[in-house]
Every structure is written in structure tokens, then in C-alpha cells.
Amino acid sequence: MTMFGTSGVRGVVGELVTTDLALRIGAAVGEDVETLTVGRDTRTTGKGLENAVVAGALSAGADVERVGVAPTPSVVRYAEEASLVVTASHNPPEYNGFKPWNADGTAYDEEQRAAVERRVKEGQKSVRASEFGDDRSVDDALRRHADSVVDAVADADVRVVVDGGGGAGSRITPKVLRRLGCDVVTVNCDYDGSFSARLPEPTDENLDDLKKAVVAFDADVGLAHDGDADRVAAVDSSGEYVEPDRLMAMFALWEGAERVVAPVNTSTVVDEVAEVTRTAVGDVNVAAELKRGGGDFGGEPSNNWIFPDETLCPDGVLAAAKVCALASEKSLRERIDDLPPRYVRRGNFEVADEKKTSVMDGVAERAETKYGEFTAIDGVRVEVEGGWFLVRPSGTEPKVRVTAEGETEERADEVYDKATDILREAMDSE
């Protein structure tokens, strides 16, 4: 398949993503269901693409429930059958995309994605006028989601700063945390589809506003969402970004997890607190393994968190509440200090989509020559003395990503340099 990446269909609007594509995807997904629940994040292009998705689904004979602007987990939790969210999640504002979901909270699997892609390429097939679906707007999806989170977490007692980034979690998360008993300060929590305050991805370098606010308001915790609030990142009371791998380990301990499902780019710090089953990168793969093989918790170092007792859909709102709950009993910094030391380095390298395969072939060839065996679950993962590294192509952007880990900061830097040397050699040979 070429249309779907690791997390749905995404691209620059006006290039890959168009209203014609939205129409075709709506029809392709709508062909298999009686009712399709549709929502979107705050992007300025979302409304037009949503309208096209709905038109396609109606023309395929499906009824449509319009949720409007809402976090992806709000839409998925509301749906009794399939859902389709118009979102590019953490991608920059010029991107948008489409992600179809099943009723159990799992994203469409490979077979379902292949069927959608085949139908999109074949072209839209409309039903007769008498068989067109009906659409209606629903206004209680956010309330239902909020109620379920409050019921699951019950209470928390911290001062927290929430940075919604202008995305779909900007309104619901502050309300949920206040209901739990938190003292909430908000930053960038007006809907803003241009993401003028910061880029949607809640990475360390994008969260200066949040860090400053945590210190200024003497908060215990800082939380930040991406565009559709399936992710949440955390900042401790000193304004320091909490590395996602360590947050994953904290969640595993908090949940009492014996088995954790995580992708191949996850730090071994998680292995210190639970048995870990590793998958290819992408919440689709983590959720699929949780469904197939069971598990108590799943997550990704991209700040996607899955609590399978609640839903198999990554839920940043639920995760935000759980961060506040665990920080109510013991500070994030104390919890971090309790974990064994591991040091992770991550980097992104621009590689055109059409060159990714040949570049990765070059990486694999060089890794085998220099190190012998490597793991190829997703990209090239190499175990070295005192650490490991992973080189893999992004499924959502024209990039190749590098992750390296060491037992000391010096070793992490050395391992990262080994990985980037191999990647640069492969890129230069193109």
C-alpha cells in the first residue's frame, strides 16, 4: 500500500490531500458500514475536508454522525460502529489527513486499509438517490468522553498547566482536570487551526510557553497535547520536559502493568519495570498487539498512550488525567529519579518519500557489514555494547528517524553518531 502511512493518510493539503481524496475515502469507508461517525481537529482545512468525507459516505449509503471539532479519542469512543477522523495529528498546519477506526478503538488494520485504498483508486461508486444516507450533528461526544475519564481516574490534586496548542484537546482537558480536583492554568487553549502559538507536535523544543508557565505559576505538572489530543507530553515542576520513555515506565508502574506493548524505538528503561513486547512503530501496531496478545498498557515514545481497560485508541485526555493522579501521590521528578539511568538521543533527517526505500536498503547493507545481525521489525535496529540504535523511515513525513540509547550520556552520543554515520553514508550514495 502507498496511501496509508503508520497512522492513517496524511499529506500537504492541495498536494496529496484534496477534497476529491476526502470524497473518495468517505465513500470507501462508508461502503462497509451503516453509520459512520465523523470528527475533525481544529485545522483550518478541516471543515471543507470533513464536508467532502461526509458527502462521500452519504453517497455510499451510510448514515453519518457529525461530531465536529473533537479529540480523536472523543470521536472514536462515541462511535458505535466505524469512525473517521479528519486530522494530521502532530504534523504541521499545512498538513491534514484521514484516519478510519473500528468500534473497539483500533485503527483500520492492513486488510481494511487495503480495501479502502483499492476503492479510492477505482473511483467513487454512488448508490441510487433513494439509498443515500442521512447526516446529523451530535453534541454530547465531548461530555461522554469527559465523563468516562472522570469515572476512570476519580480524583487528582495538583496545580497543572495545560497547553492545548490550539488543538482539539484545548477545551476538554482543562475541564476534565478541574472536575478531578486540579488547580488548572491554561496556555494556548483557544482553538487555533493555524497553530500560531506553537507547532502541534508536543516535543521538548516546542514547549517553551508551557515550561515558562509551569515555573511562573509554581505548578506541579505541565501537560501538552498535539493537534487531535491523542497524545500528551509532560513537564515536571522545574519546567523540564519528561522524556516519553520515562513517562511510559511511570505509567506502567502506576497501572501495575506486568506486560507492556511498545514499539522498537522504546528505551529499555521500560524493560526494567515490566515485560515488554515490541512492535513496529505506530499506535495501529501497538493497539493491534494489545488486542491480539493482551497486555496491561501500551505506548509510544511519541507520547501516545493506550490504556486497554478503557479503550484501544490512544487517549491524550485520559493520559493527562492519569499524569495528574500519579503526580498527586509523588512528584514526577521523584518518580523519574527512582528509575534506572538510560539516555536516549533522537533525530530526524530529511529524505524524500521516493528515496526512503533505497536509503534504507543502504542502511541495512552497511549495518550488516559493520555489526552483523540486526532486527528488522521496523527499520534497522542494532544492538551494540552498552546501548542500541534504530534507523527507520517515517510513515507520516518525508524523513528518516534515528533513535539511539546508551547507559551513559557519553555512550548515548557515541551510539547516535554510529547510527547517523551509517545513515549519512546511505544518503550520500544516492
Image (cartoon, rainbow, N blue to C red):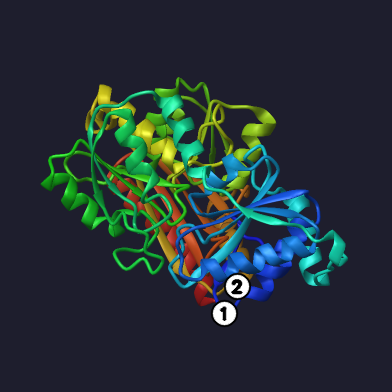
Is there a contact, CB below 8 Å, between mark 1 and mark 2? yes
Q: Residue at x 73, y 55 (%)?
A: 113
Q: Is residue 336 left or right of residue 258?
A: left
Instruction: Return the x and y of residue 57 as percentages of the image width and height.
Output: 73, 61
Image spot of residue 123 (x, y percent)? 81, 72
Q: Secondary structure at mark 1?
A: loop
Q: Is 377 in front, or is 230?
A: 230
- List the residue tagged with mark 1: 14
Q: What residue sits right under mark 2 in the picture?
A: 17
Judging depth in this view, the residue of 328 and 2 nearest the camera is 328
Residue 243 can be seen in this image: no
Looking at the rendered image, the quarter that the C terminus falls into is bottom right
Query: Where the N terminus falls, by quadrant?
Result: bottom right
Q: Which mark is residue 128?
A: none
For mark 2, give the secondary structure: loop
Return the x and y of residue 30 as percentages of the image width and height: 75, 56
Q: Amino acid at mark 2?
A: Val
Question: Spatial distance from mark 1 to mark 2, Cα to Cα?
Answer: 6 Å
Query: Looking at the rendering, which quadrant does residue 324 occupy?
Result: top left
The x, y position of residue 259, in whole percent, is 54, 25
Res 132 → quadrant: bottom right
Q: Is residue 31 left or right of residue 12?
A: right
